[in-house]
Image (cartoon, rainbow, N blue to C red):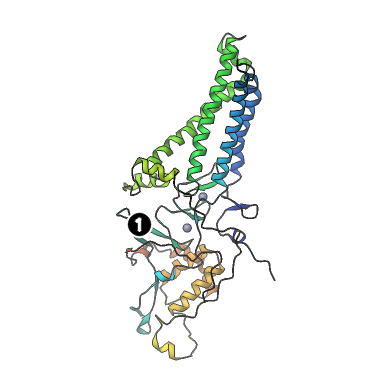
Amino acid sequence: MAKPKRVYQVWKGSNKFFFGGRLIFGPDAQSLLITISLIVVPVVIFCVFVARHLLHRFAAYDAGFAILAVAIAFTIYVLVLLLLTSARDPGIIPRNSHPPEEEFSYDTSVQHPLEGPRHTPSLQFPRSKEVIVNGMPVKIKYCDTCMLYRPPRCSHCSICNNCVERFDHHCPWVGQCIGLRNYRYFFFFVSSSTLLCIYVFSMCALYIKFLMDEDYPTVWKAMRHSPASVVLMIYCFVSLWFVGGLTGFHLYLISTNQTTYENFRYRADNRPNVYNRGCISNFLEVFCSRVKPSRNKFRAFVQEEPPLPPPTSRYREPESESTNEPRSKVEDDLEIGGELLKISRRRNSTEVDEELRGRSSNGMHSVASEAELNMGSETQHATSRPEVRNSSWGRRSGSWEISPDTLPRRPPTA
Ligand SMILES: [Zn+2]
Ligand SMILES: [Zn+2]
């Protein structure tokens, strides 16, 4: 018997997993090594070429050691924050294994061109819904890849290929999405890096000052004596614009309860911010709320999908109930629903997405065979990706809920 697979081994997103699925990174996790070296290398240079010379320059002997110790401890703190940001689930919403069936609507009024009026169901579900957040309507969209309605503030990261709650942005420096579960650590990482820059810069300046007080009367001569200090000061100065600017920007975002993504979108769309609850509450929300547990159990074993439940007869035509004739056409809504299920289990969801689009544009009169769909998916993609597909899908208001139908271990209900 084949060894049961774990969730991270069959993961459909682009993430990289380490230590048996205990650590999850984005696909660009290798950029983390660059980021770490951008922090560690300057600090090592600082310790060796600057802090070492400061050890004995204070009347109170321990003050010199404190400079070194603070630099090392602070660097470790920054690195821990970096790992907390990039090695954890940022708030990924588990994909559904099939589209939300409860949202399908069956248009039975379509007439078949050859066979005259008959009940031909066509598969539709709304691509967007409206939910009420703080008394204001917010449009939520359906994600074709994850087959779910994204909760408010959730967005699909194109790099990681996941829907992420309270999506802020995908940070290439930490190689991970910044979302609901790691935003706090990301902010602490950025702001601590800013402080580290200021600290190293100040200590280098202090060292130059000491040199000037001793044997090197001019700045120029002192700098020539300690080129490492000069390089570090330039490096910290440049970095400070980057991390300091980012810290300021995120302080503004936190105070107004926006994500980076929303900030750009709101500006473009001129939309009101419905999440702003006042500056202090916004800060409390980011820093003092409990970090939600991950929705993903990456190390859980994947359970075989339970067999398809027998088709319910809700939408079935009465005559097909009574006859046992094999159906020559696959027009039946249930057939289609079943096929969707099968396809979505078997194939990657992008293809399913294309098929869905192809089918919804073709109507359900001519559901192609699997082979045709496989061959034709490229052309369908090119020709019939219907921009008009939204026209028949009205907006619907409804209470927001996330389908519990998640990837790991569905309880066998059938
Ligand atoms: Zn998605
Ligand atoms: Zn991402």
Image quadrant containing the N terminus:
bottom right
- Outermost right residue: 1
In the image, the residue with mark 1 has its CB under 8 Å from the nearest atom of ligand 1: no
Q: SS of the residue at dot 1?
A: strand
Q: Determine whether 245 is above or below 302 in the image.
A: above
Amino acid carrying mark 1 in the image: Lys
> Would you say residue 42 is visible in this rendering?
no
Q: Of 360 and 342, which appears nearest the observer?
A: 342
Q: Left or right of 379: which side holds 392? A: left
Number of numbered callouts drawn = 1
Which residue sits at x=58%, y=10%? 213
Foreground pick, 237 / 380:
237
Give the residue pinned by disc 1.
139
Residue 271 pos. (x, y %):
32, 48
List x then y, in percent, for residue 22. 61, 53
Q: At which x and y percent is residue 259?
A: 41, 45
User: From this viewpoint, is residue 339 visible?
Assistant: yes
Image-quadrant location for residue 334: bottom left
Q: Residues within 10 Å of mark 1 (few under 14, many from 20)?
A: some
| Residue at horizontal 62 percent and vertical 21 percent from the top | 62
Q: Is residue 325 above or below residue 305?
A: below
Q: In the image, 184: left or right of 131? A: right
Residue extending furthest toward the left: 135
Q: Whole-percent x and y of residue 162? A: 50, 55
Which residue sits at x=59%, y=29%?
Answer: 71
